[in-house]
Each structure stands twice: as C-alpha cells, then as structure tokens.
Image (tube, rainbow, N blue to C red):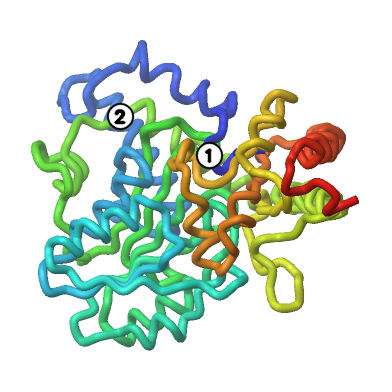
Amino acid sequence: MDANATTPLLPEVVDAMRPYWMEHFGNASSIHLHGQQARTAVDHAREIMAEFFHCHDAEVVFNSGGTEGDNTALFGLLRPGDHLITTSIEHSAVLQAAQRLAERDVQVTYIAPQPSGLIDPADIERALRPETRLISVMLANNETGVLQPVEQIAGICQTAGAYFHIDAVQGAGKVPIDVRKIGCHLLSISGHKMHGPKGVGAMFVRRGAPVESLIVGGSHERRRRAGTENVAGIVGLAKAAELAMHSLADGTFEQLSRLRDRLEAEVLHIPGTGLNGAGADGKPVMRVANTTNIWFDHLEGEALVIALDLKGVAVSGGSACHSGATEPSHVLMAMGVDKTRARASLRFSLLKTATDADVDYVLRVLPEAVEHLRAISPVAAGTLG
C-alpha cells in the first residue's frame, strides 16, 4: 500500500534487462560489436519512450531519475534575474532546487493550492512577470494523487512566452502522457515509480529548448547528459513504459480505481476520519487511480504506520523522501490542513498488481490498529466513544 514510494520490478522487466548485465555488456559509445549491441538496445528504448511521451526520438534524454530531471529543468534554464513560478506542493527535488536558485538571485513565486489540493491556473496567470522564464508544476501530487490542470497552465505559458516543466514522476504509467497535447517544453519521469528499475529515468526536452546540461563530460545523449549510459536500466525503463501503455489501454487502472475507492469508502466508515483532497462538495477531485490520503483524528500517523507495518501492511505518512522527518507534510499544510490533522494523515497507494484480497486484509487489520492506538492515547480518551 505504498506504491508511490516505489514499486517492484515486473517479471517482464527483469527478463528484458538480464542480457545487458552479462551477455551484452558493451558500452553504447563503443564502435565494436559489443558496443553496437548496447547502442541498438538504447536506440530501441528511446523509440519506446518517444511513443510513451508522444514526441520525437531525439527529444528523449535518459538520466538517473526524477530528481535529476527536475534539477536539470530548473538549473538548466534559469539564470540570475529570471523569475520562476512553481507551487508549494511540489516534490523536494523542485522546492530545494528553487530555494538554491533563490540564493543565486533567481526570483521565485510559490503558488498555494486550493483546499482540494488543486492549483488554480488563474493564480499562476496573476503571478506572471515580464522576467518569468520558467513555470514548473507537477502532474500528479505524490501525497494526495491530485492531478493538476497542466494543459491550462501550458496555455498560460505559451501566451506569456515562458517555458513549462512538468514533474510527471507520480503520473507516469498511471495516466496517459502526451507532451504535444499538453504543450509543455520539459517533462521528467522515474523508472521505479512504474515497476521499472531504480536509478534510471527519462526527460522529454522539446527541440529548441535551451537547457544547459547539468552533468558535463562526454558527448552522451546528444551532449545533453554526460556519462556512460545505464544500458540495462534504460532497457528496463522502456519495458516498464511499454507495459504501462498496455495497462492504460486494457482496463487495469479502472480496476485499480475500483479497489482504491472500495478501500477508501470502508476506511472512511471508521469514526474520526476524512479525506485529504476533496472538493467543496466533499467528493474527491481528479486523482491518479491508486492513491488516497486519509486523516485519522486523535492519533499520531507515525504510530499507525508502525502498527500497520507490524501487521505486514506498508503505508506512508507522506513522501518517502521525508521519512523520519518530524515536520508534518508540507503538501497537507499548504492545502490548509492543520498541523495536528496533517500529522494524523496516511497515504495509501496501491500497486498496479493489487487485488481484492490485499484490500480485504487491510480492512481487517486497520480498524483494530486505529482502535488500539486511540484506546491508549490520552488525547482520544472519551472523545470518540
């Protein structure tokens, strides 16, 4: 129940990668047979990723993952005096990069979400300045799953003459991505969030976007990302993307949404619970199919994470990149959730391979864990009956 932190490799991905660890181990920059076998594999993977993004092969850049992609977009485009617009609910890969750029005289504006977790494009439009060079907004939030109106934001960027970057790490493989339809200039994804390997990712970089390379050295990736290609990882990423495209077409995510909705509905029957990411009508806004974020009043979310872990259920109190942090979720706080409730919130994010039996088990052990923790909590004593 913590797929937004990472996912296991699918068997087909392992099988695709295996030859490039042993038999076809060549350097893709070498001109002999071993190198050309590796180059062919990388070129084929690039074709698959171009299909995944709906872009040209030459616009795909392989890298180490989402953090590198986000950093490349921000540090590769922005210079002192430029203006960056981003949001207060971004991943730390964007937020900390923005903070570093602010120390280098880049002006930064952070757009707060609505209580539902949605960013209002009108707020971005109002934040525009003549020196606005880049707007960076995530596709799907890693904690709530809320999908952002990226096509509308892209239209604002086009009118303003600004570049648009999307952190699509949590949306990739869960919703279709068409960079031409969206109208973005840059987009980052990571393999391990979509049943691919850790340590590999890809970027869409639109032709003509003047992005400076973050890593310099050799002429790899058309001089846009130096370093010997991780051939096995790239092959695994492409296979995961290929499988994700099939899953998006065959009803897998409709089934996953049904499981998520069933889990959510049953958990919300527990007294003193509620949904983070609901609109004014109390109904969820558009989210990726696998994610729900629920608060449990009168207990500490961290204690519930540990209690469920002891029962064999892995959930999260927020981003895995902040595990061990003492501060409550910056995403929930930005949405206006008070600190106590933010600390009492859990994210459930289902694997693509989740089953009804998995949900049944969670629904069996979760109410008992909540009841036990509330029973020993002095805050909850006598509050919920």
Percent across and percent down for residue 104 are 12, 62
Q: Residues within 10 Å of mark 1 (few under 14, many from 20)?
A: some
Where does label 1 land, which residue? 5
Residue at 77% across, 55% down: 273
In this view, the residue farthest toward the right is 385
The residue where tag 2 is placed is: 230
Assess whether mark 2 and mark 1 are in contact (beta carbons under 8 angstroms). Answer: no
Q: Quadrant of the N terminus?
A: top right
Q: Say what amino acid the circle numbered 2 marks.
A: Asn
In the image: residue 369, left or right of residue 9: right
Q: Is residue 168 above or below residue 216?
A: below
Q: In this picture, is 32 found above or below 260?
A: above
- 243 sits to left or right of 273: left
Is residue 120 visible to us here? yes
Q: Position of residue 261 (x, y in %)?
A: 79, 54
- Cα–Cα gap, marks 1 and 2: 22 Å
Residue at screen point 25% across, 19% down = 26
Mark 2 residue crowding within 10 angstroms, few (<14) / some (14–19) / many (20+): many
Total label count?
Answer: 2
Q: Nearer the viewer, mark 1 or mark 2?
A: 1
Across and down, in percent, residue 216 comes to: 11, 42
Q: Is residue 360 visible?
A: no
What amino acid does circle 1 point to? Ala
Asked which secondary structure carries label 1, the reply is loop
Q: Is residue 366 left or right of residue 162?
A: right
Q: Name which residue lies at 24% across and 26% down.
A: 36
Q: Nearer the viewer, residue 299 or 35?
A: 299
Image height of 51 relative to 184, above or below: above
Q: Earlier in the sequence, mark 1 or mark 2?
A: 1
In this view of the protein, which residue sits in the foreground, 202 or 18?
Answer: 202
Viewer-proximal residue, 126 or 379?
379
